[in-house]
C-alpha cells in the first residue's frame, strides 16, 4: 500500500488522507481548543478521489493517520473506444490501458492528458 503515516495536525486543505480505506482530498479542516480534560481535536471533511463520496473524521491532533501517495502522471490518448472510455498510454512507462472519461470532457486521439494513479486506480483530471 503506497501510504505513509502523518499526524492529524499536519494535514491541510487540498492534501490527501485515507478515510475508510479510500484516498480522499481534504475540503475542510478545523480544530477545536483543548478542554479542561483532554487534547485539541481536529475535524476533517474530505471527498473520495476515485469514488466522489463525502467522508469525515474527528480525532485528536496528535494522533497519527494514513496519507496516500498519489502519483500525478502524463499520458496520451491512443484511441477513443466509446464516448465514455479511451485508451491511454503512460508517457513514462509506455503502458497502455483503458480509462473512463469524465462527463464534461471530450478527448480525441493524440491529446495529452494528466491523470492520478493510486494502487491501480486511475482518474483523468
Image (cartoon, rainbow, N blue to C red):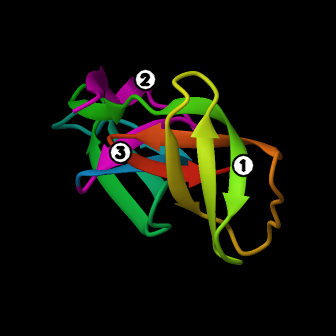
* Dot 2 or dot 1, earlier in sequence: 2
Q: Residue at x 64, y 70 (%)?
A: 81
**What label sits on residue 120 in the rendered view?**
3
Using the image as rendered, state which of residue 105 and residue 12 is in the foreground: 105
Looking at the picture, how far across and down is residue 14, in whole percent? 60, 39
Using the image as rendered, state which of residue 89 and residue 60 is in the foreground: 89
Judged from the image, the secondary structure of the residue bearing numbered disc 3 is: loop
The reply, left or right, for residue 104 in relation to residue 121 is right
Q: CA distance from mark 3 to mark 1?
A: 18 Å
Judged from the image, the secondary structure of the residue bearing numbered disc 2 is: helix
Q: CA distance from mark 2 to mark 3?
A: 27 Å
Q: Residue at x 44, y 66 (%)?
A: 51
| Residues shaded magenta | 1-20
CA neighbours of label 3 inside 10 A, class few (<14), some (14 to 19), many (20+): few
The reply, left or right, for residue 58 in relation to residue 114 is left
> Magenta stretch containing residue 4, yes or no?
yes
Q: Which residue in the structure is indicated by mark 1?
A: 77
Q: Which residue in the structure is indicated by mark 2?
A: 10
Q: Residue at x 29, y 29 (%)?
A: 2
Looking at the picture, how far across and down is residue 87, in whole percent? 61, 55
Looking at the picture, how far across and down is residue 66, in whole percent? 26, 33
Kindly indicate the quadrant of the structure image that contains residue 68: top left
* Dot 3 or dot 1, earlier in sequence: 1
* Residue 32 visible in the shown view: no
Amino acid at each position: 500500500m503506497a501510504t505513509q503515516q502523518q499526524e492529524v495536525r499536519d494535514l491541510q486543505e487540498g492534501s490527501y488522507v485515507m478515510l475508510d480505506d479510500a484516498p480522499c482530498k481534504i475540503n475542510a479542516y478545523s480544530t477545536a481548543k483543548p478542554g479542561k480534560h483532554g487534547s485539541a481535536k481536529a475535524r476533517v471533511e474530505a471527498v473520495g478521489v476515485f469514488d466522489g463520496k463525502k467522508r469525515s473524521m474527528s480525532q485528536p491532533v496528535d494522533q497519527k493517520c494514513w496519507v496516500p501517495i498519489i502519483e500525478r502522471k502524463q499520458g496520451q490518448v491512443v484511441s477513443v473506444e466509446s464516448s465514455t472510455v479511451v485508451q491511454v498510454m503512460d508517457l513514462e512507462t509506455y503502458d497502455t490501458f483503458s480509462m473512463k472519461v469524465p462527463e464534461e470532457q471530450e478527448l480525441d486521439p493524440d491529446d495529452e492528458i494528466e491523470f492520478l494513479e493510486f494502487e491501480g486506480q486511475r482518474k483523468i483530471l
